[in-house]
């Protein structure tokens, strides 16, 4: 989905190259220049960023639920032990990731919330996230990709209803996230379709390109992620960049000679 109010840029580089020599903190604090995309003039360049622990320092779903519960119904904070119990069930493989997220939403926010109220809370959470949970290097890189002419997309397992305001604040033009079920003015806990995670995220990225008329053979995709679960999407990209990588992803990135950047202190 497009992010309302995001700055529009021409995604066609018309022969211009992605900026050479831009340097970003790399492994062990070294400076690492991201490789230049070498492609034909007609190519469209798409820069896709994961959100949690790639652009942000920590994950966003649990912090959002706590933030929203305090504002919508503080009594629901008493459900935190039940949330922890559900998370243990997921670790024991008794719950799917999708069912876990639906359960956490239902416990902390209720099964039905007015869209208008949730939108206000989501905007407040976005402001909080931008102020306290964004890597400065990620913010700079997002700006550089957009200003170079790339189409900037944030693709995340986060729910789109709170992901979109964060993306807008970061200047991303499009968002791909987990969709929630809504009925008129009511937002429900149930996920619409599949959780945007792992292979499903890659499928959503492919669908996004098709929906925007971007042929794969003339679209150059650079993708940034921290987690091994995004391996299908990283393999799909022309330029995979392991960003603040988990140990498992770092091993794969080194084996496949991918670019690695690490902004953790």
Image (cartoon, helix red, strand yellow):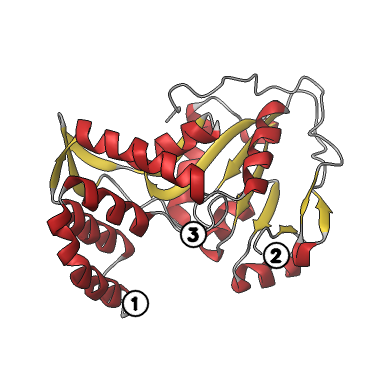
Badge 2 crowding class, 10 Å Cα cut-off, few under 14, some 14 to 19, many 20 or more, is: many
Cβ atoms under marks 1 and 2 closer than 8 Å: no
Q: Is residue 2 left or right of residue 96?
A: right
Q: At x 77% / y 19%, what residue is drawn?
A: 14
Q: Which residue appears farthest toward the right when viewing the image?
A: 21
Q: CA distance from mark 1 to mark 2?
A: 26 Å
Q: Who is closer to the viewer here, 34 or 56?
A: 56
Decide which of tag 1 and tag 2 comes sooner along the chain: 1
Question: Which label sits on residue 152?
Answer: none
Q: Which is more foreground, mark 3 or mark 1? A: 3
Residue 124 vertical placement versus 260 (above, below): above
Q: Which residue is mark 3?
A: 58
Q: Which is more foreground, mark 2 or mark 3? A: 3
Label 2: element kind: helix
Q: Is residue 152 left or right of residue 51?
A: right
Badge 1 crowding class, 10 Å Cα cut-off, few under 14, some 14 to 19, many 20 or more, is: few
| Residue 202 picture location, percent across and down | 50, 49
Q: CA distance from mark 3 to mark 1?
A: 19 Å
Question: Which label sits on residue 91?
Answer: 1
Q: At x 66% / y 33%, what residue is drawn?
A: 143
Q: CA distance from mark 2 to mark 3?
A: 21 Å
Q: Quadrant of the C terminus?
A: bottom right
Cβ atoms under marks 3 and 1 closer than 8 Å: no
Q: Is residue 203 left or right of residue 189?
A: right
Q: Which residue is mark 2?
A: 253
Q: Is residue 10 left or right of residue 155?
A: right
Q: At x 29% / y 66%, what residue is drawn?
A: 96
Label 1: element kind: helix
Badge 3 crowding class, 10 Å Cα cut-off, few under 14, some 14 to 19, many 20 or more, is: some
| Residue 22 picture location, percent across and down | 81, 41
Residue 177 vertical placement versus 80 (above, below): above
């Amino acid at each position: 989905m497009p992010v309302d109010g995001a700055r529009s840029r021409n995604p066609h580089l018309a022969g211009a190259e992605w900026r050479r020599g831009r340097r970003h903190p790399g492994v062990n604090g070294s400076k690492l220049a991201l490789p230049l995309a070498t492609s034909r003039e007609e190519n469209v360049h798409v820069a896709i960023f994961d959100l949690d622990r790639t652009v942000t320092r920590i994950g966003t779903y649990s912090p959002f639920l706590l933030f929203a519960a305090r504002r919508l119904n503080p009594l629901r904070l008493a459900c935190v032990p039940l949330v922890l119990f559900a998370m243990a069930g997921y670790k024991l493989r008794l719950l799917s990731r999708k069912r876990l997220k639906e359960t956490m939403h239902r416990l902390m926010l209720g099964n039905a919330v007015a869209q208008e109220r949730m939108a206000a809370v989501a905007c407040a959470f976005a402001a909080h996230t931008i102020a306290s949970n964004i890597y400065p290097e990620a913010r700079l890189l997002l700006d550089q990709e957009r200003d170079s002419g790339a189409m900037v997309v944030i693709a995340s397992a986060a729910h789109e209803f709170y992901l979109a305001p964060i993306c807008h604040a970061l200047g991303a033009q499009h968002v791909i996230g987990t969709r929630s079920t809504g009925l008129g003015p009511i937002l429900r806990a149930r996920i619409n379709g599949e959780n945007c995670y792992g292979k499903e995220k890659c499928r959503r990225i492919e669908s996004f390109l098709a929906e925007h008329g971007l042929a794969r053979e003339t679209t150059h995709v650079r993708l940034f992620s921290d987690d091994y679960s995004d391996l299908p999407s990283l393999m799909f990209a022309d330029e995979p960049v392991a960003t603040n990588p988990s140990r498992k992803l770092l091993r794969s990135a080194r084996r496949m000679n991918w670019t690695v950047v690490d902004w953790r202190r």
